[in-house]
Amino acid sequence: MHDEVEGKLNCGFEDRGSRSVKNIARPVRPYLVQREEPAAARSIRGAALQQEIEYSRGPDGVRLGWAKVGTGPPIVKAANWLNHLEYDWESPVWRAFLERLARGNTLIRYDARGNGLSDWDVPDVSFNAWVSDLKALVDDAGLDRFALLGVSQGCAVSIAFAERYPERVSHLILYGGFALGARKRSPESRAKRDAMATLMRFGWGADEPVFRQMFTSQFMPDATKEQADVWNELQRRTTSPECAVRYFETVGDLDVRDLLPRVQARTLVMHVRGDLIAPLESGREVAAGIRDARFVAMEGRSHLVQESEPAFEREEIRLFLSSDALNLLCFERARRCGRI
């Protein structure tokens, strides 16, 4: 097995020498699988890990900014609210998470229409437009089959894409997502969402401590001053107040519950227990609706897990992708040997 997988997985192996094993006459040579990737994979980190920014067009001509970084099997991250390709890559809120995704993989991500480096002044900010933009982008990038990652409302976009194009999604990874938008969950949730939209029209990107604290505390209740400052600056850089409200309202009205049973891709669903934006039950609902989906609940309260939190150290995504690759290699070896 070691001969089959060496150099093909994002992990290392430690030779443990010749050992005698019960019920096997001759000694065997076991290997310890090391969770940390080998030096060759680590070399892409730090200064050597540079993203390339390119531009594509959506079906209606809207310009979409996208970035590529790293080498290896592709992972496409669907856009979510509050993205900026350049600013996120340097920020303490996103950088560590993105670097981890790019280890041993080619990470491709993009800014949604009306957001970041994509066109801001757009006629259509809708769920169908977001799914169509994802299709146009992966086509332009020349990707036939890839792992698809959704974060927050990017999960709904990823679910819809995986349902429409099952032949293109090898793995579906959903983090902090929901199938039903906040405006549709309850009358109280709808009223709270509408009040937030009104405040956004007047306070978005402005230097108003009350609005800033209210907004940031929902996404990162335990944020450091540096993280809060970065999140506040992201508001100003990411989009206009008008487009922010349009985006916010579209997200609040999402409903992809009927698509869940039709998803065919192997699926991993991750959720933080104390998430204030998307309750834990939202993640459980998504996992329950997708056949054979694996659900992982993690400790924490931030909508996006930060490097300082215990959940950040968990390698769920990498283990999910690597274990599937290992299973495939085992199957192929057994098939060639005539055992199956």
Image (cartoon, rainbow, N blue to C red):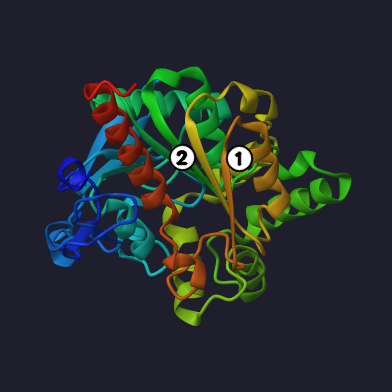
Farthest residue toward the bottom?
225
* Crowd rating for badge 2 (residues with CA inside 10 Å; few <14, some 14–19, many 20+): many
Contact, CB < 8 Å: mark 2 with mark 1? yes
Q: Is residue 82 above or below residue 294?
A: below
At label 1, the amino acid type is: Arg
Question: Which residue is drawn at the image coordinates 31% and 24% (left, top)?
Answer: 339
Residue 48 visible within the image: yes
Q: Is residue 297 above or below residue 118?
A: below
The image quarter containing residue 329 is top left
Q: Residues within 10 Å of mark 1 (few under 14, many from 20)?
A: some
* Image quadrant containing the N terminus: top left
Percent across and percent down for residue 219 are: 59, 63
Helix, strand or loop status at disc 2? loop
Residue 69: where, in percent of width, then height? 22, 48
Rendering coords of residue 126 (x, y %) = 57, 29
User: Of the numbered discs in the image, which one, if any, rests on residue 246?
Assistant: 1
